[in-house]
Amino acid sequence: MKDLKRNSSLTTSAKTDFGFIWMTVPKNYRESSDDGVFTGLLLGPLIAAGLLISALRLSGESSLTSSLPQQWRIEAPAELHNSHDVPTALDALIRARYNLVDLGTFCSTILLLHVCASWYQEYRCLKRGNTAEGERTSVPRSEGRRSLYYILFTLGVTGVIFALKVLLQQRNLGLWEHLNYFEVIFCALFYQFTLYVAIRLAHRVFTLGELGLVCFGGTAVFMEFLNITIAGIRPVTTPFIKTYRLPTPLLTFQIALIAGSLLTGFLLSPFLVLSRHIAQRPVRRLRNPQDKPRNRRLLALGFYTGTVIIVGGVIGMWTHWCLGKRNPWLWVIFWLLEGKRKWTRPALVAYWAALGSLSVAGWNRQLARSRRYWHRNSMTSETLLASTAPDNTALQGTEQPGTVTIPVPGCSPSVGVAGMTFSALPALPALPSLPNGTQVASDLLDAADKHVPTLGLNARRKFFHALAVVMFIPGIAIDPAFTHLSFSAAFALFVFTEYVRYFAIYPFGAAVHLFMNEFLDHRDRGTAILSHFYLLTGCAGSVWLEGPSQLLQFTGILTLGVGDAMVSRVFGVKSASVPDSWTGFHCGEKDRVSSMVANDVKNFGRECRVHSLDRRMCLASPPFRSCGNLLGANF
């Protein structure tokens, strides 16, 4: 019932003051009182600017002995020794982050073009008096026409952006000067492609701001993958490795795990789509109902086999090549023993595995007991009502229309629906004949309820915030480099788990869906469930961005694991009564991307001020002048 309510159709307002990607409608986005357009436009360039300031501060420290963050036990970043202009990895990192600032303003410009063009087209159609075919007058109902119009608009925007890049370079205005022509064309096409694919596949999952920020991050990661590959193919002609983090094996494994998991889903999409299609079809509509289990097993076998081939073949070979012809599996095994002590990293793995297993097992037991109580409550009520009808004995041995028989393997027919026996209790059909039969049943159920731990939805969700604090703080304190790789592996595991859940991959799909369904709220009404992705990314963000001090690496965990949970617990009820229009923020926005990354940027800036960074060189550079003009800042 809860799943039906979650997936039920919702009344979507017109939202004429909201921004939209070209050829999209309100039902494509998550329900929210704010579209978050400023988050999508400003947060990407701000993150890039914070990373650049951090790299410039590191280059100005005279006592710097390594470009790696403190206490990071990982081999030195890769360097190309074919150019005298970029002698160190830190200098290459600074140049790459100048490129990232340009990429952030570039993607924000494309997003702004989409929003403005969508507004203008809707205004024109309304002014002409056109009849709306769907939610918006300017968007046709035909999926084919939508896709065609989006492709044409994407090519048009790419041409306009390329012409603007040429004009800016001829006038020496300094905007996007660290992006070459190939990057301008490729990033424009790829960013718009990810916008459309994400909004169509992840239906009702993102607001506009979240969509823009997520696609900017995806574009940046893909550009790192592309630049690492180009540097490996053409090491002589490539001036430096243009990655926005230090080009260590940690970055190589992160790209292999995260980008590889998404690539696996794309290549195996036929198996995934067919698995969900067969699982959704009722048995009575199948020509051969007995073939449904066999077909699901075959599709699951194809998916698992294809995953092993892609991970061990394509992704494994690329990682092997990037590691200098070293086997990635053996590299991880040997690196596992290179912590402070040989047992440190295996102990962390065992600690994380024990906490995760106990948490999942405990919640499975708690949720099973809760379902058992509520199911028994409903079944007993039906039995009591049916037994008061005349001639109820005539119904014995027959199955009424509309009822569902749930057999329990290994149980006799006398066993209850949940597999429980009540040998010490009188038979339930005899209860109504007692003077207080209904009262006796109610007392029994009330007594059972006292032994079933019940938690509200908010408490269930915040439990995992507390679990993240307990799991990740020891890892970052003891070995942040190993925790970096573990975060990447956990993200890839979440991706494959979502594949299994949404596409009903046999035999784990139903179990995963039922487990996660107990923790969903009104923000998880879309096709994909991303709450755990946001929590993991928020905790790992400051580690993935390679914060220069160990204190900064804890900001994500402390913000989401402690701060967000406490605010939600203490002020959640009070803030629920305050209209969103008074604050300008929606609880979903605060609970997700904005609070996740904004605190990292704030702490980067605070640390730069504390260490008296000489900002004149940084802020006077053309990329910062351009970023400042876009953000309306006075430097």
Image: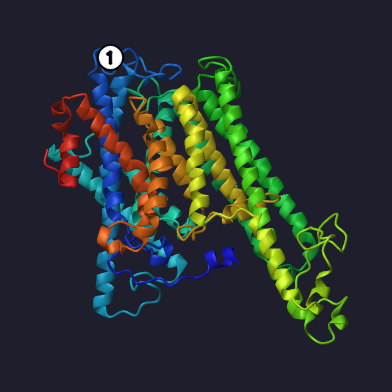
With respect to residue 519, does 167 lie above or below? above
The structure residue drawn at horizontal position 33% and vertical position 25%, both measured from the top left corner, is 548
Q: Nearer the viewer, residue 176 or 149?
A: 176
Image: 345 above or below 627: above
Give residue 327's quadrant in the image: top right
Q: Residue at x 64, y 53 (%)?
A: 367
Placement of the C terminus among the 4 image quadrants: top left
- Give the residue at the far front of this rendering: 435
Residue highlighted by disc 1: 84
Tell me if 517 is positioned left or right of 70 in this view.
right
Quadrant location of the N terminus in the rendered image? bottom right
Q: How many marks?
A: 1
Please state which of residues 401 and 182 is positioned toward the viewer in this rendering.
401
Picture layout, residue 86 above or below residue 531: above
Image quadrant where residue 138 sits: bottom left
Whole-percent x and y of residue 392?
83, 82
- Label 1: state its secondary structure: loop
Q: Inspect the image, locate mark 1, and give the three-letter code of the amino acid beneath it.
A: His
Give the answer, above or below, for where 19 lies relative to 348. Answer: below
- Coloured how? rainbow
In terms of image quadrants, where is residue 281?
bottom right
Q: Is the residue marked by circle 1 packed among few (<14), some (14-19), or many (20+) residues within 10 Å?
A: few
Is residue 16 in view from this perspective? yes
Q: On the picture, is 414 further left or further right than 299?
A: right
Residue 180, how many percent across, how many down?
A: 28, 35
Looking at this view, is 257 or 516 the one in front? 516
Residue 40 percent coordinates (x, y): 31, 50
Residue 131 placement (x, y as % from top left): 34, 80
Q: Residue at x 49, y 61 (%)?
A: 525
Left/right of residue 225 with respect to residue 306 in the rendered view: left
